[in-house]
Image (cartoon, grey):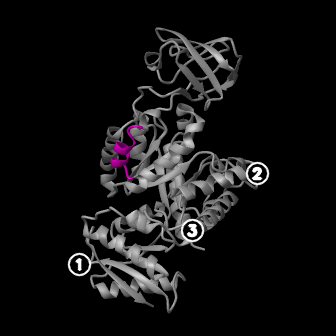
Amino acid sequence: MHRATKIVATIGPASSTQEILLQMIKAGLDVVRLNFSHGTADDHRQRAGFVREAARQAGREVAIMADLQGPKIRVGKFENGKTTLIAGNTFVLDSDCELGDDDRVGLDYKDLPRDLKPGDILLLNDGLIVLAVTRVAGNEIHTVVKIGGELSNNKGINRQGGGLTAPALTAKDMEDIRTAMSLGADFIAVSFPKNATDMEMARQLANVAGAPYGLKPKMIAKIERAEAIPALQGILDASDGIMVARGDLAVEVGNAAVPALQKRMIRMAREANKFAITATQMMESMIHARVPTRAEVSDVANAVLDGTDAVMLSAESAAGKYPVQTIETMAAICVEAEKSEQAELERNFLDRTFTRIDQSIAMGALFTAYHLGAKAIVALTESGSTALWMSRHWSHVPIFALTPRVGSERAMQIFRNVRPLHLDTSSDRDVALQQALDTVVSKGYAARGDMVVLTVGEPMGQVGGTNTLKIVRI
């Protein structure tokens, strides 16, 4: 059955062989995430090579997302690897400390003391440990433990309510962008952007690094800072898509605020013609268990009903016991949730004006296909923009986007309800349309007697040239 919602999966020790990747792709994997917080440049290059070969064996393109580490503020290392903090005791975060002990630990972000004042609340290890700042003395942050627990090497630090000044792009990120472009990444995910400027700078760096390889990656803003929420529209305008990164975001704004923010972010992304990915702990229990919890099933289904383009797996596929089964399970949940979605094209199109011919054709095709009960929409596209615009509105009519450009084919893997296919270009419109129909029929997506809505541009081969809508019965 056609599945509209796409699946992004992180690969790591549990999924870094060509054999496992091939099984994951066959199970429904659309986009592979390389987490640059872990591993070396050579690790990522090797994994990217495995992805491309597994995709070739599976007979379809799979996109690669390079996820930058960003300025994740962490404690340093402990002499014994960890310590236990007890509520009521004092503890010092010391940027000069080399190896931590039971009383203090170092910091990887040396400017943290300048960002804090007495009364600030620090959340460590994803909020499991809570410290209250009592005073800041030079490079030392003196705190009282409010909620204790085990604290081990390199655990993250967040300030409740946000407000830390660490730049979105570190020196490591800049080097990682160059690595990502050398291995042919299709997407760059930027961690902790605060505003549009962070995304514009990242795009500039990625375009420069990608130029020798003829690449211009799509830029994804990971929304995980409190400061990003009021700046969301500007960040969207500067990005191709966003990731609802619920882990760090929840630590900064509070768990209770995240579900409503998720719905708002996905809605804003769709209205801005951008894509959205929902991430963090979606199938967490399947790291160790063969089946998810009922709450996890509802979480994935609700993200689908919110209109997300993609749902993402992290540790479940990178380090879990059942990476293939997790993707199969997630795909099944998506399909079931999509069955209950109602198309609301009339309401969506009210009070909208389209100034571009290609966008008007895309909207016209969507509306026509829905009301005529067409089996499919077949869009011949160079850049993928026509397919993106169509995918912003739910109609239950699958969209097949045919393109001669491999880069566009991979980029469209993230678009909701879009199945990208490769079609070598033809300068003759009628020949190209017949080839497109033949391709869709040969793959079993349509059959003789089905009604299909086609979009194409004349002259052929121009980006942004879609200007023709045609209705045919095969």
Label 3's element? loop
Q: Which residues are magenta?
A: 230-240
Outermost residue, top side = 137
Q: Residue at x 43, y 85 (%)?
A: 437
Residue 136 screen position, x and y as percent: 49, 10
Vertical comparison of 414 with 443: above or below: above
Distance from label 1 to label 2 (Cα)?
54 Å
Look at mark 2 in the image and give the residue it sits on: 289
Specify the quadrant that holds the C terminus: bottom left
Examine the structure image and report whether residue 253 is included in the region drawn in magenta: no
Q: Residue at x 45, y 53 (%)?
A: 267
In this view of the protein, which residue sits in the foreground, 428 or 252?
252
Contact, mark 2 vs mark 3 (Cβ under 8 Å): no
Vertical comparison of 82 with 366: above or below: above
Total marks in image: 3
Q: Which mark is residue 97?
A: none
Vertical comparison of 324 with 374: above or below: above
